């Protein structure tokens, strides 16, 4: 009986508290706050992953990218002073590609960036892909490759293995 009485007292006190909160100083209804539109955007994650490396463009000041073991790739936004995710467009079935083993920038074109993507090298994991961008990672062209990348494997912090050649032929789109 004591337990039911305690619960009843608790419920009554909560009801009384909500009545006090919902009324103004002299028993008048409280004014409602005006609705403010909300803009949804990415949450800045301040931990919970491993940044394998930061890649700087050799000629273009401020152009830099970060690669992570399981969290995708990021481009530094100089005016906003924050990292912007580049792979949030990937669907769930391609989460393997959120492991970025390597990033290469084209030394002769700061708009071109190349990502070697794949999280694990075990037999159950799908093959990797090379993601190619001509607009600093705003959009990508995906090229599936018959190998696996180990963005979250041992050695992921040893440095980026990819490099882009400075010279391209006129026939090569990338």
Image (cartoon, helix red, strand yellow):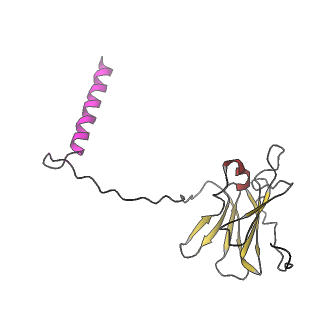
In the displayed image of the protein, which residue is found farthest to the left?
26
Q: Is residue 96 above or below residue 84?
A: above
Q: Is residue 47 left or right of residue 102?
A: left
Q: Is residue 89 above or below residue 132?
A: above
Q: Is residue 10 above or below residue 104?
A: above
Determine the image quadrant of residue 27. top left
Q: Is residue 75 left or right of residue 145?
A: left
Residue 142 point in image, percent of width and height? 76, 61
Residue 89 point in image, percent of width and height? 64, 57
Residue name at image x 56 percent, y 59 percent: 46
Magenta residues span 1-29
Determine the image quadrant of residue 166. bottom right
Q: Examine the residues drawn in magenta and state their main secondary structure.
A: helix
Say which of 140 and 31 sits in front. 140
Residue 123 point in image, percent of width and height? 84, 44
Residue 129 point in image, percent of width and height? 79, 58
Residue name at image x 24 percent, y 39 percent: 17
Say which of 92 and 43 sits in front. 92
The quadrant of the image that shows the N terminus is top left
Say which of 102 and 167 sits in front. 167
Q: How many marks?
A: 0
Q: Is residue 22 left or right of residue 75?
A: left
In the displayed image of the protein, which residue is found farthest to the top?
1
Residue 13 drawn in magenta: yes
The quadrant of the image that shows the C terminus is bottom right
Determine the image quadrant of residue 81. bottom right
Residue name at image x 81 percent, y 71 percent: 163
């Amino acid at each position: 009986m004591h337990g039911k009485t305690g619960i009843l007292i608790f419920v009554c006190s909560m009801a009384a508290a909500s009545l006090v909160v919902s009324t103004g100083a002299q028993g008048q209804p409280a004014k409602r706050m005006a609705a403010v539109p909300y803009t949804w955007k990415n949450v800045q994650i301040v931990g919970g992953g491993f940044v394998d490396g930061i890649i700087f463009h050799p000629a273009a000041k401020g152009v830099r990218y970060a690669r992570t073991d399981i969290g995708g790739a990021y481009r530094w936004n100089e005016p906003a002073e924050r990292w912007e995710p580049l792979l949030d467009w990937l669907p769930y079935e391609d989460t393997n590609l959120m492991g970025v083993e390597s990033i290469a920038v084209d030394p002769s074109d700061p708009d071109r960036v190349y990502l070697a993507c794949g999280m694990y090298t075990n037999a159950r994991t799908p093959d990797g892909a090379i993601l190619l961008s001509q607009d600093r990672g705003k959009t990508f062209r995906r090229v599936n490759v018959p190998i696996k990348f180990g963005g979250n494997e041992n050695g992921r912090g040893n440095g980026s293995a990819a490099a882009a050649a400075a010279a391209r032929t006129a026939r090569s789109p990338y």
